[in-house]
Amino acid sequence: MIPITEAIEIVLRHTEKLGVESVELSNSEARILAEDIIADTDLPPFDRAQMDGYAVRADDVRNTPARLRIVGESAAGAGWHHEMNSGQAVRIMTGAPVPKGADAVQQVELTREDGSEVVEILEPVSSGRSIVRQASEINAGETVLRAGEQISAAMIATLTSFGYAAVRVSRQPRLAVMATGSELVDVNKKPGRDQIRDSNNYTIEAYASQSNAIVERLPLAGDNTEELKRMIREAAETSDVLITSGGVSMGVYDFTKVALKELGAEIFFERVALRPGKPTVFARLGNTLVFGLPGNPVSVAVTFNLFVRTALRAMQGATHTTLDRDHAVLARDVKGSADRESYLPAVLRTDEKGVLLAEPLKWGGSSDFVAFAKATALINVPAGAKLIDRGSTVRVVRLPD
């Protein structure tokens, strides 16, 4: 067995970046940037009013009430592009350009206009008040987003504001997923005696889609080495990544490792000091990365998020490839393992004092997918820690939303 950190390092060492493509902005959310985003203009591009009111000279309204002649109006998208002199005011709207000569905006509530093109300023206003200065947020030429960042909905306004109608992103990985085992039937079939419905293919597809992979679900593979070899070989010819589930332990009917070795795959590791998920295989067949995940559903979820997700994000040049880590206080005792690190399902919540708590789920082991469905995080219990008491601070990793 190898440690989890070493397994992740091996995955990253053998993962190569994919190519780059250009996509329309409307199709870019969640993709990984393959270029830096540069501001092509100052932001704001001009001195901008923060509220409705009157653009004035602060010196003119030092003593109030002060009467000023209204010489124009500046609206958003239709500014007043003249110079304002002493004793004058310009009616101005939120977001409008502040005219040359003005150095403050007095809010409309502190003014009075009598309809004679004269405004009475009722209170003084300091220089710079209610004005957002040009380039106070961003300077033209500044890098605002960097290659490797994942595009979020919050970033769309930035991309549009600087003219990125299309953006260069990393190509999406092509991923094939295959569940093995003669006991499996598809979701739309009623299991017969000694059979169960396949859940792993769909779980992997869901997680892989969150990582931008283009997923192909392959037919279920039975416990036949020659058939398994054919399916693996064909999938490897058209995919960047192949994921199998099941058939990687030491049992008589565990054929996945045998098939990979007979096909000439390079095996990088085949056992990890992880609970759940010890019999995880990582290999390469031709140019295709192959992950052989355990058959139990919880083990599939844990090993996918620790290893496969890391590879998929690294392929796309993501700056951050692993799950988000945090610290939390245990809400209940947890048990560890003598020789393996444990990643145990939990729900994160915040108590009335704002402390992040990790509530371990009551689950029946790596096949208990019903309990795991509630998990929002995994509690990391170091190897050798037989028991960690309630109230202790532990490391957690947050599962993808």
Image (cartoon, rainbow, N blue to C red):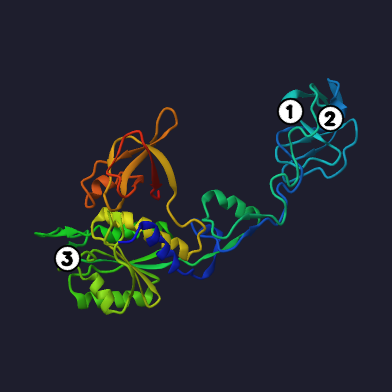
Q: Position of residue 119 (x, y in %)?
A: 82, 26
Farthest left residue in view = 193
Q: Answer above or below: position of 310 versus 88.
A: below
Q: Secondary structure at mark 3?
A: loop
Query: Mark 3 — residue?
Result: 251
Q: Earlier in the sequence, mark 2 or mark 1?
A: 2
Q: Nearer the viewer, residue 175 or 334?
A: 334
User: How far apart are labels 3 and 1 at the CA level?
Assistant: 80 Å
Crowd band around label 1 with a 10 angstrom C-alpha radius: few (<14), some (14–19), many (20+): some
Mark seen at residue 34: none
* Front-most of residues 282 and 112: 282
Evaluate if marks 2 and 1 touch, with contact meaning CB atoms under 8 Å apart: no
Which residue shows up at 52% across the image and 50% down it?
Answer: 153
- Amino acid identity at mark 1: Val
Q: Residues within 10 Å of mark 2 (few under 14, many from 20)?
A: many
The disc, 3 or 1, on the residue closer to the chain's N-terminal end is 1
- Name the residue at the right extreme: 86
Mark nearer the N terminus (3 vs 2): 2
Q: Residue at x 48, y 69 (%)?
A: 18
Labels 3 and 1 touching (C-beta < 8 A): no
Q: Is residue 231 visible?
A: no
| Residue drawn at x 43%, y 33% as measured from the top left | 355
Q: Is residue 150 left or right of residue 213?
A: right
Q: Which residue is mark 1?
A: 108
Between tags 2 and 1, which lies in front?
Answer: 2
Q: How many numbered discs sit on the rendered protein?
A: 3
Q: Which tag is nearer the camera, tag 3 or tag 1? A: 3
Q: Position of residue 17 (x, y in %)?
A: 49, 68
Please rate how many residues cluster around mark 3, counting C-alpha atoms within 10 Å: few if below 14, some from 14 to 19, many from 20.
Answer: few
Dot 2 corresponds to which residue? 58
Question: Which three-letter amino acid code belongs to the residue tagged 3?
Answer: Gly
Give the image quarter of residue 213. bottom left
